[in-house]
């Protein structure tokens, strides 16, 4: 399968999950002109025009981080329990990070007013506090075992400094722990971020 990505973008979560699960993959980067490194028009692959995009061996295209992460977990049988509350907490965390954190970063990547940035900072601080409280004394976000939610949380926290929001101590510890994991070290190196 091919992971179409941009270095350091949210596709990093999928990249980490692919490495951790041991699934075979090929990275294909896109440029700002929406061309893939193998010369294809990215918009013909994914008309939404944004990454991540997962291209399966049979030509099927999957988009959206939550879906790609769930596909990687289901295909590999790793990073997401088949049943039980941890499965649902991981999926819940993915949805929360996508809607309440990832979407709030928009003002910091584009030309938004300072008022809009301040509103986003307030919402981000609230969301980070909720995640920090959820961690309790766990090693990872929803359990003592890594899940796909942790892959996404790593990226969410990596981008946090752009917002100017201070992370709670529990999330800073989590980020440092994740950054030292072999799957994260390798993903960062493969994206030229090492």
Image (spheres, rainbow, N blue to C red):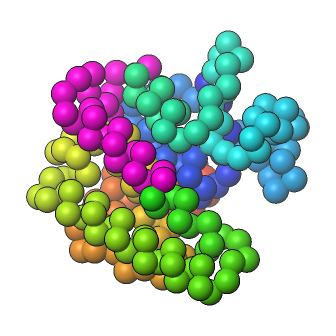
User: Which residue is depicted at the point 34% across and 42% down?
Assistant: 92
In the rendered image of this protein, does residue 94 appear above or below residue 161?
Answer: above
Q: Is residue 160 visible?
A: yes
Q: Residue furthest left?
A: 137
Secondary structure, magenta segment, majority class? helix
Residue 23, horizontal then vertical, whole percent: 47, 26
In the rendered image of this protein, does residue 61 appear above or below residue 15?
Answer: above
Residue 106, horizontal then vertical, whole percent: 62, 66
User: Which residue is depicted at the point 51% across and 78% down?
Assistant: 119
Residue placed most toward the observer, 109 or 23: 109
User: Which residue is depicted at the point 27% across and 32% down?
Assistant: 87
In the rendered image of this protein, does residue 2 appear above or below residue 160?
Answer: above
Residue 124 location, quadrant: bottom left
The magenta stretch spans residue 78 = yes
Q: Give the range drawn in magenta.
A: 75-99
20 sits to left or right of 51: left
User: Which residue is depicted at the point 67% across and 51% down?
Assistant: 6
Residue 183 location, quadrant: top left
Q: Which residue lies furthest to the top in this view?
A: 58
Residue 93, horizontal then vertical, whole percent: 34, 47
């Amino acid at each position: 399968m091919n992971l179409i990505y941009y270095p350091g973008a949210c596709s990093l979560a999928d990249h980490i999950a692919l490495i951790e699960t041991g699934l075979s993959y090929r990275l294909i980067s896109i440029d700002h002109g929406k061309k893939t490194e193998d010369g294809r028009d990215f918009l013909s692959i994914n008309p939404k025009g944004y990454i991540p995009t997962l291209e399966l061996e049979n030509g099927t295209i999957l988009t959206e981080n939550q879906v790609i992460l769930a596909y990687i977990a289901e295909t590999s049988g790793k990073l997401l329990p088949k049943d039980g509350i941890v499965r649902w907490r991981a999926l819940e965390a993915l949805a929360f990070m996508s809607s309440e954190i990832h979407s709030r970063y928009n003002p910091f990547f584009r030309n938004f007013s300072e008022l809009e940035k301040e509103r986003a900072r307030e919402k981000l601080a609230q969301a980070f506090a909720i995640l920090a409280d959820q961690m309790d004394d766990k090693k990872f976000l929803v359990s003592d075992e890594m899940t796909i939610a942790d892959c996404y949380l790593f990226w969410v926290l990596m981008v946090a400094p752009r917002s100017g929001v201070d992370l709670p101590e529990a999330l800073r510890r989590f980020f440092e722990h994740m950054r030292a994991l072999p799957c994260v070290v390798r993903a960062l190196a493969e994206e030229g971020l090492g």
